Structure formats: structure tokens, C-alpha cells
Image: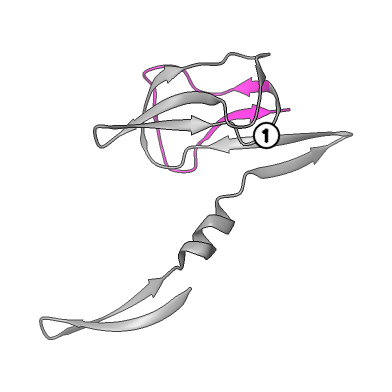
Amino acid sequence: MKLYKINVNGKTYEVEVESIEEKESKVQPKKEETSNESTTNVLAPMQGKITTLNVKVGSVVKKGDVLMVLEAMKLENDILCPVDGYVRQLLIKENQKVELNQLMLVIG
């Protein structure tokens, strides 16, 4: 991140600007090691409402599968599976509102 000062209508503001490369590297799915099995947490990329849920606990998923659809600001966003595996935990349901970075499901 880089820090800049900008001047708007005579007022000075300090802003931090993040490059696209930095942003993409931060969006990587989080993996945790628990015993010999690794898990991947799927977090909400923005606040919104889950309109469609395509998986349930135990569903086998492949990288790139559409896990769910999240509606935010009247736009539908496909939430894609980051890894191959199965749905270990499902912490949300259809028509539920989610917050930014809320844990939605765990893939094992």
C-alpha cells in the first residue's frame, strides 16, 4: 500500500492506495491445518444476501464450481469454489444476509 496526500476543495486528506497485485494476493483462500487434513475457509467477499445455494454438507466440489450466488447492490455474484474437496461445514442458508469476510463454508 502507498500513502498519498490529496487536496479536495482546500482540504487535505491522506489516503492509502492498494495496487491490484496486492489486492489479488490478499484474496487467496485461507487454509488451516487440522491433524492430517487441510481445510479451506470460504469467506464472503462483500456484504449482501445469499440468493442461491448450490451445495450442502457432504457435497463433492471441484475448483471453479459455483457454490452459491450472492446478491449485492442488485448484482448477482457467483461465489466459486477455490479448491477441490467436499463441503465440510455450511454456516449460511438461502436468503441469509452476510457481512464482509463472514465465514460461509468450510471445504475439506
**Residue sitting at 64 percent across and 29 percent down?**
106
For disc 1, the neighbor class at 10 Å (few under 14, some 14 to 19, many from 20) is some
The part of the chain drawn in magenta is 87-108
Residue 80 x/y as whole percent: 53, 32
**Residue sitting at 41 percent across and 80 percent down?**
3
Left or right: where 30 falls relative to 95: right
Residue 55 x/y as whole percent: 56, 16
Q: Is residue 43 above or below residue 24?
A: above
**Residue sitting at 68 percent across and 36 percent down?**
40
Residue 98 x/y as whole percent: 41, 32
Q: Quadrant of residue 47?
A: top left
Q: Amino acid at mark 1?
A: Val
Outermost residue to the left: 9
Left or right: where 66 falls relative to 37: left
Q: Quadrant of residue 26?
A: bottom right
Q: Quadrant of residue 11?
A: bottom left
Disc 1 secondary structure class: loop
Residue at which label 1 appears: 83
Query: Is 45 within the magenta?
Result: no
Q: Is residue 29 above or below residue 88?
A: below
**Residue sitting at 71 percent across and 43 percent down?**
31
Query: Is 106 within the magenta?
Result: yes
Give the colour scheme of this rendering: one colour
**In the foreground, 82 or 57:** 82
- Could you tell me how many numbered marks the image carries? 1
Residue 51 x/y as whole percent: 36, 20
The quarter of the image holding the C terminus is top right
Left or right: where 85 falls relative to 53: right
